[in-house]
Amino acid sequence: MTKRTAGARIGAATCLAAGMLLASTVPAGATSTPDSANPIDHIVSNMTVDELIGQMTWTYVYGNSADDASMAEQNQERYGVDTPREVVETFDLGGVLYFAWSNPGIVSDPELTAELSNGLQAVSVGDEGSGIPLATTIDQEGGIVARMGAPMTVLPGNMALGATFDAALARAQGEILGSELAAVGVNADFAPVVDVNTNPANPVIGVRSMGEDPQNVAALGVAQIEGMQSQGVAAAAKHFPGHGDTETDSHTGLPIVTYDRATLDQHLLPFEAAIDAGVDMIMTAHVIVEELDPEMPGTLSPAVLTGLLREELGFDGLITTDALDMEALKELPDNPLTDGEIAVLAIQAGSDILLMSPDVPATFEAVNAAVESGDITRERLEESVTRILEWKVERGVWEEDPSVPVDEVMDVVGSAEHTATAQEIADRSVTLLRNEGDLLPLDGDESVFVTGWGQSGVPGLAQAFTDRGVETDHLYTANFPSAEQIAQAAEAAEGHDAIVLMTHTPANAAQTQSQRDLLAALQATDVPVVHVPVRNPYDVAWENPAPAQLVTYGYQRPSLQAVADVVLGNVEPTGKLPVNIPTADGEGVLHPIGFGLGYEDEEPQHPQDPDQEHGFFLSNSWRGGVADHAFMYGRFSDEVLIGDWDGDGRDSITVRRGNTFFVNNAPRGGTADRVFAYGRPGDDVLVGDWDGDGEDTLAVRRGATFHVKNSLSGGAADHVVTYGRPGDDVLVGDWDGDGEDTFAVRRGATFHVRNAMAGGRADATFTYGRAGDEVLAGDWNGDGEDTFGVRRGRTFHIANSLRGGAAEIVMDFGRPGDEVYVGDWDGNGIDTIGLRRTP
């Protein structure tokens, strides 16, 4: 789904189709067939205020079918009626949410879920309903937050995905979620979490995040969004403007963050990428960000939702609150709020959707009163409802028959392909952090004792070892073991060849201590311990570490299977930390982002080490020898682009994933200085200073047509020009020294150079090098005019003028298999060579 412009979301064809459809499904207040140019406008303008509030109200209903009265007591307590049907009809709901505790059948019965969806949709479009299909929604993130379990595909979770650093797997995860939810009639998923988990003490996000690196979170988040929405299910990036640096769970208290705008921008980066990628929805955070609004949490703050999200970031999709029944909204200092006041403030802040209001009748009463008093205008409600209805048309929710085929559900959910992908994510996520004495992998003929955290996880992991032919015993010690249970585990471990201990970081420090005591007791035996944190990876920093440490970022079945395979050597550990692991005292970094061992490693390789084997190696002069800069940036699968992005005279590295660019303004690793989307994932991308302002930007090429941008931003091109032929090799340079880059095309060993951003005939044509040479463009002597160099193996032949003949410089640098890039790394006006070496 492409990014939309307010007021122009539905094209003429869509409007016509909508008009034909909506004529038979009009709310009670819209008594005539829509005959305006925009049928949505017609419908909204004829709605009552209650009908408008109803469309903005998305909440849960108790029961496994539309007419299930088995949970009437709960429905009566919350809504004053008995069945899901009556809730939908009474309030003309715009959407419903599924939970295990409100719709218990969804946990393990996908066909029942599809029947529930079909029944609720029939109610909503029926004679007593709103006439408009429902948004049927769920929190199905994968990992520890998944409302539906097997036979739906069980996914390892977001931080496990983050440890793969693989956008293709992230897209596959999104496609799995989207296709399976669509099959059961769910049309919106409150996922993915794109919070950047920078706080190890975060009690609510943790492994729900894809990590601590904003670039990785942005890339994987965008890929998930694109995958999910490609299956017709809306994605919702959450929790805006970031819940990753909190120490309070907003379900139980009010988090407050005090960081500056520069830090905030790092947390915003994945949301900006999601917006550029066309995410349908963004969910708010019940978090006070003092830099933006010291008084109100994001959910209730106009500065956050309207000022930042709508106006500054340009988001025009749906804004939904997080659940309005969370305690954070009731704990504003010196500002107790009623449920009705919370709903009013959320609308005034800019939210379109009131999610899970704890008192729906009070919400209707308060919003009606606010409209009567002028605190909320009818136009403000119509704005949100228009946006909701347009989304329902665009996303395919509003169809003449919104039901799904129940008999086809099991052809989709839990398929062999989906299960294999989930297992691949798990296998590639397991991260080996310690392996003293090459304890791992085990030979397979040892006896193993599994113990520790997880009432189902401990026997599940033990079974995985047994299934692989390993003699295995196990003892679940309680999640937070007592001294007696610790002693029992240590005694039971005696006589085995290896202990596999599962731990799980809770929010309570005292509970953590009991798990540390268990580790110490097991270490005191003569049996070597393999420590496996199965939630947050920070447990590995405990004092007196086990000789082997593996982190999984989750305890779902695929992760347990992966642990068994890695321990036994059936799978090579390839996961890399997506977060920094602090030292035990919190004063330093024990293991940095990107760290992870393999069984083939002779010694640990920290990506930040200047003498690393792989990464970028940049030279500031025309000589061989040692590089002047050596660092890691991005991922080895990234496409690399070189340019002076900020006009400081120094070139640096940008990496591209799909149509998302991660820009770095210095020859170093670390976090990107800027992330944005431009063009399409399959475009050829070229870098140049097209307007001579000193800052390089991008052009994308499709065939012989070039779409040139003069700024690092998305949106329309500043120039569109055709030059050369679709099959030509294209090079960029300032051939005449006027400060503006243009194109040259190469055919064999012949170069056709153009000095203006235009089509037509070449300004210079000549032959240089051999047809099979790799060709580089740069200003090798600092005269302001770019020329060509050719590379053969590790030897470079450089010419300082646009002509044939002999090279002025011949130099050896790097290895024949290295990727080569050209840039002025130190700002002295002379371009030189950089290399990237991948494993």
Image: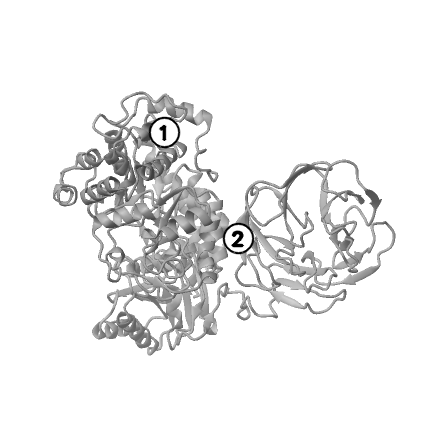
Q: Where residue 404 appears, x then y in whole percent?
A: 32, 31
Judge by depth and name the residue closer to the eye, 112 or 532.
Answer: 112
Judge by depth and name the residue closer to the eye, 24 or 46.
Answer: 46
- Camera-near label (2 vs 1) is 1
- Of helix, strand and loop, which one carries label 1? helix
Q: CA distance from mark 2 to mark 1?
A: 35 Å
Q: Which corner quadrant of the image does residue 723 belong to?
A: top right
386 displayed left or right of 603: left
574 displayed left or right of 485: right
Amino acid type assigned to the residue bearing label 2 in the image: Val
- Of helix, strand and loop, which one carries label 2? strand
Count the marks: 2
Q: Where residue 381 appears, x then y in whole percent?
A: 31, 38
Task: Work out which quarter of the rendered image holds the C terminus and state it.
Answer: bottom right
Q: Please tell me whether residue 60 is drawn above or below residue 439 in the rendered image.
A: above
Mark 1 surroundings: few (<14), some (14-19) or many (≥20) residues within 10 A = many
Name which of mark 2 and mark 1 comes first in the sequence.
Answer: 1
Mark drawn on residue 389 = none
The answer to whether residue 736 of the structure is visible from this angle is yes
The answer to whether residue 238 of the structure is visible from this angle is no
Q: Which residue is mark 2?
A: 675
Residue at figure coordinates x 43%, y 42% from the top left: 316
Q: Where residue 372 appears, x then y in whole percent?
A: 23, 39
Mark drawn on residue 40 = 1
Amino acid type assigned to the residue bearing label 1 in the image: Ile
329 displayed left or right of 781: left
